């Protein structure tokens, strides 16, 4: 195709194919537009990727609507629930349903046996001074007025309707799908040094939240215990497009034993920020140190790049708030 | 005319607030089957093996629809506007975007339909992909479309929408400064709360009734009739309340396949997309790449504009050539620029095909033009209102495609914005009107450029 | 399995893990709760369960055995519209109407629980509900008005002032 002189200034021709130029400006003091590829690593826009050969329809699009037949047990006491659970190998536990029913609706899990815990007597908040024991089926809405970091974290989850339905036990046990982190309450519970009492194969166990999370298969959470800290704080990223999920959050709790910090959205589960704790006297330094404790990755909510830049400021903010409250 | 100027509530307001308003998913007919689609899990691939035997044999499955069941597989929805067909209703030998539909199963219930979809045996051989419109023109770019990587069928078999007006060289020679900018709005998904859906009911007299969420009932009627190769009087489309469209329910996304499945199964078929399908496979507003280079004078006139637009059409053309055409007519925005050099390309990539969304083709250019006006004002030290008022369209100014403005409102709108923002304008600018240019508002470079009669 | 649906006891035939949404729409013929996402994210499936707004798409029907379920059909009908329903009509708070039944369910629960007419609080209460048509302003206005007013003129509408709903800023939410 013919080119006039002026056009040649803004088109490159490679062979017979004319390629529009990205170099803007032809004369005078030209100024290029916004740099598209900056020298810094930009997040990859295509975050939801599947390997070729994945069967999307089998795993993703299925909106079965729960029309298949499933044995559903509804135990009416904690003992009955523990007995029905057995070693957990053959049963899907449904607490509030806010996580599991999504998976059922989309066909990600197809249980043949399921257990509803809504009548198992596991919803309670027992307080004795500053010690709390909270039943696994306690809805988040019963926690939103508690002290920081737990209360604000619960209040930050999704919206009121989900808070009425979601439970502390279900949230603690949230699975980690590739699309986004969940299990927000893991952060405050780790920061509080909470313990988890669970049943399953063998005896009942009571262990730290981190130990529980490392080994939660085959366990049925009964209750979670913690002590109110001297001071606590919670800070979460608030991005409109991720309104129902928490891309990144930091919880802090200070007791006589020192400062504990934890983050969610910075790894597959909630994670303790030990390096940040060691530098807790200097919030800015602690923020930077926190990057050593985490395993950031891209997901549907945010990129590792973005989390790397925001985690230090969340850590610093939590430490500063606790400092000011102390 | 009692209604004009009156404040009236919606006629369906009471229906909405009592839950009585009927949407497609609320319609029930006896014997209704549920449909599920097999969709491509990959961005670009050849289909090397495709066997639906097991799915068809499953108990509770009444029809498995593939490309073979579609009488006219490729129909250009805007063929009346000269855009030829390029998109198969169901994939045949290849898939060009993740989520592209390959088969539709109609079964007694959703679980059975899903199980049948999973029983379809299919193998893919990956092909290289293209997602960056800027790279589409490289000699070594993967070939995405049988027509090449950009649409070649504008009038006169042009491969771009081209506008040339005035003398661009002279404008750039006479400029005091050249100011450029690149603008790249991203794709936007409509996210209607009601997903794509259709319920097709075969009638005893051989016709088919389709309860549709289309925004354009007669348009969809034509599309379905064309794919089915039947006269339009064989099809009855029942439109009604759309649960949010915004331009995304003009693509006739569910009606045709639901109709074919219903005819094959001889039963009513409802096909309701999941939210995930809606996000992945329903069309979006397109991403755009726009480069604007303006020739500007120190006293605030834009003498000329060079512009390059790359419109990301996704894997198929759909309505993109039409959207780009509208875009090109508006590339000067609310302002009069007599010397123009515009090239716009409809580029194919392995994205989900793009479509209309509120202000098709024009929201992108509005964003780019207004941002660029601010950029120029910043760089040249102009007041942003005065700069706009000076260049704003007036009666007898002409658009990029030489349409005479008979009564443009640009000046009044800019005044209204200044007013709302609490900005006080200098008297000469506060007194500006849309009247034909004269005096200070008629610089030399516009003399002879205006059109005093006709359109 | 039985539950109370808008004042009547109904018996469920569907399998126990069927969502309450599917049971209401397909088995009971109550189509006001909508399938918007089947993930609890859009809010369009919300009804009242024992007086609390709940996502029916995330509720296995077995979980409402013995409970009382109220849909918008149980709140008011065209002859007897509630204050909230009237206010939505009067303030033009519905366009396509798909999000409307659930929006009204949650707004009703909010007001019944003593919610105020403060716009920021109303937004916070309804943040689980997506609307793609109205831009939310008219919905907030409608709910605010229904806090104090119980009757609205259904033959005309009240214009929405061009206010911008201001919320606390931010990129970060904190608690302390």
Image (cartoon, rainbow, N blue to C red):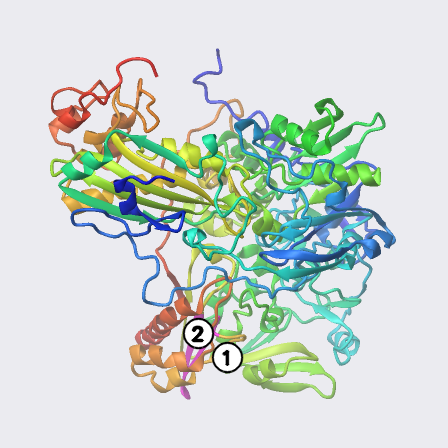
Q: Can residue B334 be seen here?
A: yes
In the rendered view, tell whether residue A126 sits above or below residue B334. below
Q: Residue at the location (59% across, 40% down)?
A: B86
Residue B239 in view, yes or no: no
Magenta stretch: dominant secondary structure: strand
Task: Answer left or right for B178 relative to B59.
Answer: left
Compared across the picture, whether B411 is left or right of C149 comes to left
Label of residue A299 in the image: none
Q: How many marks?
A: 2
In the image, what residue occupies the spot 65% across and 44% down?
A: C34
Chain under callout 1: A
**Label 1 element class:** helix
Specify the subunit that label 2 lies on.
Answer: A
**Residue visible at 32% across and 29% down in the picture:** B400
Query: Is residue A142 within the magenta segment?
Result: no
Residue B167 x, y percent position in the rendering: 23, 31
Q: Position of residue C9 (x, y in %)?
A: 79, 47
Could you tell me which quadrant the C terminus of chain B lies in? top left
> Against A44, is C97 above or below?
above
Can you give x and y, in whole percent of width and height, for residue B22 in the image? 67, 33
Q: Is residue B444 above or below residue B48?
A: above
The earlier-in-sequence mark between 1 and 2 is 1
As helix, strand or loop, the secondary structure at mark 2 comes to strand
Q: Which residue is mark 1?
A: A190
Q: Give, as a single range, the part of the protein colored magenta.
A: A249-266
In magenta stretch: residue A254? yes
Pick the front one: B81 or B426: B81
Residue of label 2:
A251
In-front residue for pair B162/C40 = B162
Neighbour tally class for label 2: few under 14, some 14-19, many 20 plus, Cα within 10 Å = many
Instruction: For the residues labelled 1 and 2, say whether their Cβ atoms are less than 8 Å apart.
Output: yes
The span from disc 1 to disc 2 (Cα, nearest Å) is 8 Å
């Amino acid at each position: 195709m013919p080119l006039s002189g002026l056009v040649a200034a803004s088109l490159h021709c490679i062979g017979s194919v004319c390629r529009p130029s990205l170099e803007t400006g032809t004369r005078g003091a030209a100024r290029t537009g916004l740099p598209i590829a900056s020298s810094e690593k930009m997040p990859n826009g295509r975050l939801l990727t599947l390997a070729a050969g994945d069967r999307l329809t089998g795993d993703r699009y299925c909106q079965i609507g729960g029309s298949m037949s499933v044995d559903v047990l509804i135990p009416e006491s904690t003992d009955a629930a523990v007995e029905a659970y057995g070693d957990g190998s053959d049963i899907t536990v449904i607490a509030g349903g806010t996580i599991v029913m999504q998976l059922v609706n989309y066909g990600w899990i197809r249980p043949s046996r399921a257990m509803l815990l809504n009548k198992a007597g596991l919803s309670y908040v027992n307080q004795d001074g500053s010690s709390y024991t909270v039943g696994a089926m306690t809805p988040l809405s019963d926690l939103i007025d508690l002290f920081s970091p737990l209360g604000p974290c619960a209040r930050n989850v999704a919206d009121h309707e989900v808070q009425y339905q979601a439970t502390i036990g279900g949230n603690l046990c949230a699975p980690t799908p590739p699309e986004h982190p969940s299990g927000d309450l893991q952060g405050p519970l780790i920061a509080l040094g909470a313990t988890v009492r669970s049943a399953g194969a063998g005896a009942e166990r009571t262990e730290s939240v981190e130990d529980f999370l490392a080994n939660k298969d085959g366990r049925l959470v009964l209750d979670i215990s913690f002590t109110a800290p001297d001071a606590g704080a919670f800070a979460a990223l608030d991005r409109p497009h991720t309104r129902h999920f928490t891309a990144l959050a930091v919880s802090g709790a200070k007791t006589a034993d020192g400062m504990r910090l934890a983050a969610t959205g910075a790894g597959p589960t909630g994670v303790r920020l030990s390096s940040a704790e060691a530098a807790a006297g200097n919030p800015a330094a602690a923020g930077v140190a926190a990057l050593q404790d985490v395993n950031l990755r891209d997901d549907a909510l945010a990129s590792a790049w973005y989390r790397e830049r925001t985690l230090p400021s969340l850590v610093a903010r939590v430490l500063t708030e606790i400092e000011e409250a102390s | 005319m009692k209604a004009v100027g009156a404040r009236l509530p919606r006629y369906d307001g009471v229906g909405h607030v009592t839950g009585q308003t009927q949407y497609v998913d609320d319609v029930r007919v006896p014997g209704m089957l549920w449909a599920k689609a097999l969709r491509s899990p990959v961005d670009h691939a050849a289909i090397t093996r495709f066997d639906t035997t097991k799915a068809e044999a499953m108990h509770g499955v009444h029809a498995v629809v593939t490309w073979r069941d579609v009488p006219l597989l490729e129909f250009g929805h805007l063929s009346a506007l000269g855009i030829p067909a390029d998109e198969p209703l169901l994939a045949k030998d290849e898939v060009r975007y993740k989520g592209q539909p390959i088969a539709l199963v109609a079964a007694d219930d959703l679980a059975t339909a899903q199980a049948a979809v999973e029983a379809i045996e299919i193998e893919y051989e990956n092909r290289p992909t293209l997602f960056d419109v800027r790279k589409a023109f490289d000699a070594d770019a993967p070939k995405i479309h049988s027509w090449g990587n950009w649409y070649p069928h504008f009038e006169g078999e042009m491969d771009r929408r081209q506008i040339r007006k005035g003398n661009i060289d002279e404008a750039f020679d006479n400029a005091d400064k050249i100011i450029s900018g690149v603008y790249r709005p991203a794709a936007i998904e409509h996210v209607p709360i009601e997903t794509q859906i259709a319920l097709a009911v075969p009638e005893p007299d051989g016709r088919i009734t389709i309860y549709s969420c289309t925004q354009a009932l007669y348009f969809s009627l034509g599309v379905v009739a064309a794919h089915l190769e039947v006269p339009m009087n064989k099809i009855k489309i029942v439109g009604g309340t759309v649960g949010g469209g915004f331009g995304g329910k003009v693509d006739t996304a569910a009606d045709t396949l639901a109709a074919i499945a219903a005819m094959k199964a001889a039963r009513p078929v409802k096909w309701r997309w999941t939210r995930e399908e809606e996000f992945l496979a329903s069309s979006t507003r397109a991403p755009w790449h726009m480069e604007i280079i303006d020739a500007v004078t120190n006293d605030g006139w834009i003498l000329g504009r060079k512009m390059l637009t790359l419109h990301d059409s996704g894997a198929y053309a759909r309505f993109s050539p039409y959207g780009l055409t509208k875009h090109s007519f508006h590339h000067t925005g609310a302002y009069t620029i007599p010397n123009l050099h515009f090239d716009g390309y409809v580029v194919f990539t392995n994205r989900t095909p793009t479509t209309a969304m509120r202000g098709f083709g024009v929201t992108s250019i509005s964003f780019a033009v207004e941002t660029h006006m601010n950029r120029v004002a910043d760089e040249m030290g102009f007041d942003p209102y005065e700069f706009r008022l000076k260049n704003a369209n007036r009666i007898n100014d002409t658009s990029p495609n030489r349409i005479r403005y008979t009564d443009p409102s640009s000046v009044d709108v800019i005044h209204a914005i200044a007013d709302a923002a609490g900005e006080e304008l200098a008297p000469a600018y506060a007194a500006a009107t849309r009247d034909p240019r004269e005096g200070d508002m008629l610089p030399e470079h516009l003399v002879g450029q205006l059109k005093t009669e006709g359109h | 399995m039985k539950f109370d649906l808008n004042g009547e006891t109904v018996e469920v035939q569907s399998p126990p893990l069927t969502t309450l949404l599917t049971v209401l729409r397909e088995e009971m013929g109550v189509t006001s709760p909508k399938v918007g996402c089947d993930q609890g994210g859009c809010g369009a499936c919300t009804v009242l369960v024992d007086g609390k707004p709940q996502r029916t798409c995330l509720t296995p029907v077995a979980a409402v055995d013995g409970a009382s379920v109220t849909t918008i059909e149980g709140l008011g009908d065209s002859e007897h519209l509630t204050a909230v329903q009237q206010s939505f009509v009067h303030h033009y708070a519905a366009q396509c109407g798909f999000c409307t039944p659930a929006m009204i369910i949650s707004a009703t629960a909010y007001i019944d629980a003593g919610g105020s007419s403060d716009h920021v609080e109303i937004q916070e209460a309804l943040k689980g509900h997506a609307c793609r048509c109205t831009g939310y302003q008219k919905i907030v206005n409608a709910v605010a008005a229904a806090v104090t007013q119980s009757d609205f003129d259904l033959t005309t509408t009240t214009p929405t002032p061009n206010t911008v709903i201001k919320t606390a800023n931010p990129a970060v939410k904190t608690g302390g």
